[in-house]
Image (cartoon, rainbow, N blue to C red):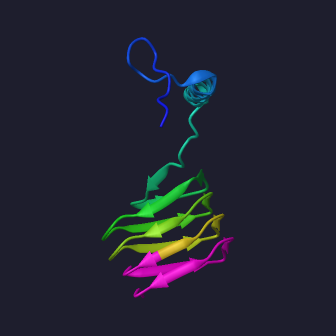
């Protein structure tokens, strides 16, 4: 069995291929850090009434009541346990999701995604 050549400090060398791969990894890491971060969709908590506004995601917290009138949601409308949503003339780009909600009513509205109501009234 032949031994490989060892660099003067006792560490085996990586050769030219290792140097190139190391340089590529450094450049990739630098590019990733310099790119702008993508903005996460904001969630608006609804207690009470929201009128003719455009929002990202809307969440009705547990036990609260939310009325949407002419509102546009560019994401999801989520109704938490025991919460009530009454939506009139709304436009939802995503889904309306209710699980164990007290009441979910969507009237004269457009929902591009799904309306998912589980164990709710």
Give above or below for 81 relative to 45.
below
Q: Residue 26's image quarter?
A: top right
Residue in front for this viewpoint, 51 or 93: 93
Task: State the image coordinates of residue 16 (x, y, percent, origin top left).
Answer: 63, 22
Find the residue positioned furthest to the front.
1
Q: Quadrant of the C terminus?
A: bottom left
For the point 41% across and 61% down, the residue is 48
Does 69 appear in magenta?
Answer: no
Residue in front for this viewpoint, 80 or 104: 80
In the image, the segment drawn in magenta is 98-121
For the point 49% across and 83% down, the residue is 117
Give above or below for 26 relative to 54.
above
Find the residue positioned furthest to the top.
8
For the point 45% across and 77% down, the residue is 98
Task: State the image coordinates of residue 97 (x, y, percent, origin top left).
Answer: 50, 74
Task: State the image coordinates of residue 96 (x, y, percent, origin top left).
Answer: 54, 72
Residue in front for this viewpoint, 29 or 53: 29
């Amino acid at each position: 069995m032949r031994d490989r050549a060892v660099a003067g400090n006792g560490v085996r060398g990586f050769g030219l291929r290792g140097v190139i791969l190391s340089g590529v990894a450094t450049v990739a890491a630098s590019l990733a850090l310099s790119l702008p971060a993508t903005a996460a969709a904001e969630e608006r908590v609804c207690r009470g009434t929201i009128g003719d506004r455009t929002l990202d995601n809307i969440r009705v917290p547990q036990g609260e009541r939310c009325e949407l009138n002419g509102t546009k949601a560019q994401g999801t409308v989520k109704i938490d346990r025991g919460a009530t949503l009454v939506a009139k003339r709304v436009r939802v780009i995503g889904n309306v999701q209710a699980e164990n909600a007290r009441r979910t009513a969507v009237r004269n509205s457009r929902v591009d995604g799904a309306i998912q109501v589980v164990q709710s009234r």
